[in-house]
Amino acid sequence: MTRTDRFVAWVGLAGLAVAALGWALDAGGFYGGWLAALTLFSAWPLGSMALLLIHALTGGRWGDVLRPALRLGVCSVPLLLPAVVPLAAGLSPLYPWARPGAAQQFGNSFYLNVPFLAWRGAAYLVVWFGLGWLVLRGRGLARIAPAGLFLLAITTTFAAIDTTMSLDPHFTSSIYGMISAAGMALLALSIAVLLTAGEVAQEVRADFGKLLLALVVLWIYLDFIQLLIVWQSDLVAEAPWYLDRSRGGWGALRIIVAGGHFVLPFFLLLSPRMQRSRRVVVSVAALLVAMEVLRSWWTVLPSLGRGVNWIDVACVVGMGGAAIGFARWAARRAPGIHTPGMEAVHV
């Protein structure tokens, strides 16, 4: 075990220990923080899978250079199974439709019910584990990429609806899954760039900058379209979702996320000279990762009627340390999924 591995392991264990303490002291507060952290870190392996499958179809030097870091992300997918276990006990505190006798209050109870949710969740995990295994094998990716991307699109869309959109069972959005998918790809790309951009040629780093810029524009376009549709419709079932996330500190956080997730990256990466700068590209990638953390809290916690606290931070640190530590261990030791060149990736 390297010094980096030991550091990551200790940070992850410390975060999980503090999160467990939060579970003991305030179970209701823990479930929201854990869901936000799970939403954030599930995007790493799923977004990495999608980018590897896209590169198998399109080619390009960006994927050749980022492949080790993206495969590192895919290696963390087995952690999704233990990570969902705490949520099984927190369904009632999190989701109004999961509470006893609540089904009659919602017209979509045929979909939002605990048994059907369990079956869907199991199906998502089977698909993700299977795709992860195929992607890490690295054989014939171009042949499986179309079907793999289709399965990822379907499962990630429904998983986003099940885990976060259904926190408010009255809210509906046909674009919600696409926004989540764009965020997953952007997070996975940002982490891969963060791990890789310091040791590549300027031309390759410029490719990274262009890809980050494209995904930033895609994300803000989808996010703005959803806001515009909800605003112009002004329906009682949809408007409260944004109203809850616009009051007090949440409104200020929304402005911060808009600035850090779009405005700053957009204008910094417009310049070809900036795209070649190691400092700029690495800083933008780090900023986008940080904004994804804030956005996961902004998405989940207002529905629960509370702000960010120490339990939420502990959940992110604990799950992040566990995901990175397990991915590095799996990439080096698990049979059949060793990632060539992983020694060059430093966390």
Image: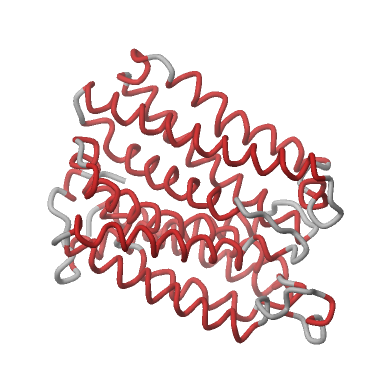
Q: Quadrant of the N terminus?
A: bottom left
Q: Which residue lies at the image location 78% right of the left edge and 40% below the top edge?
A: 231
| Chosen colour scheme | secondary structure
250 or 98, which lies in front?
98
Residue 44 in picture, x, y percent from top left: 41, 54
Q: Quadrant of residue 167?
A: bottom right
Residue 179 in picture, x, y percent from top left: 55, 48
Q: Quadrant of residue 124?
A: bottom left
Q: Which residue lies at the image location 34% right of the left edge and 13% below the top edge?
A: 273
Residue 297 in picture, x, y percent from top left: 64, 51
Q: Which residue lies at the image location 84% right of the left edge and 51% below the top edge?
A: 235
Residue 40 in picture, x, y percent from top left: 51, 55
In the picture, measured across the screen, residue 20 lies left or right of residue 216, that is: right
86 or 272, which lies in front?
272
Residue placed furthest toward the right: 236
96 or 59, which lies in front?
59
